[in-house]
Amino acid sequence: VLDRDTLKTIVRFTNDKNIHLVSDEIYAATVFNKPGFISIAEIIEAETYCNRDLIHIVYSLSKDLGFPGFRVGIVYSYNDQVTLCAL
């Protein structure tokens, strides 16, 4: 689990270098230590300069809901080309 400052640094670095960032948040609801899970979505909303087309979040329902074998994956992206490929 990464803290808020580390996530900000990663977002700024990937933006400066024009690198796509894929944040795997499959275990987001199973983090119980402090300060808790911080989504990359929170970071990009707070950043004044952020190319959101470079940020992609992947998530799955099976881990949080305790449904082994329930294969539902989610790709969240502001990049239209990425979301069209996920169809």
Image (cartoon, rainbow, N blue to C red):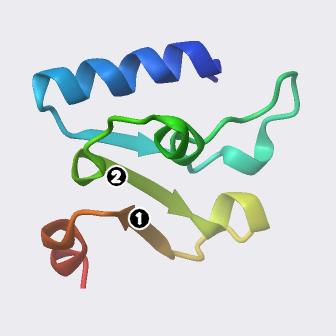
Q: Position of residue 73 (x, y in %)?
A: 46, 70
- Residue placed under numbered mark 1 in the picture: 76
- Residue placed under numbered mark 2 in the picture: 56
The residue that appears at 64% across and 67% down in the rendered structure is 62
- Tell me which numbered mark, 2 or 1, is placed earlier along the sequence: 2
Q: Position of residue 17 (x, y in %)?
A: 12, 22
The residue that appears at 80% across and 31% down in the rendered structure is 36
The residue that appears at 45% across and 69% down in the rendered structure is 74
The relative height of residue 26 versus residue 12 in the rendered view (above or below) is below
The residue that appears at 74% across and 59% down in the rendered structure is 64
Of the residues shown, which amino acid type is indicated by label 1?
A: Tyr
Q: Distance between the Cα atoms at labels 2 and 1?
A: 6 Å
* 24 or 72: nearer the viewer: 24
Of the residues shown, which amino acid type is indicated by label 2?
A: His
Q: Position of residue 43 (x, y in %)?
A: 53, 36
Residue extending farthest to the bottom is 87
> Which image quarter is the C terminus in?
bottom left
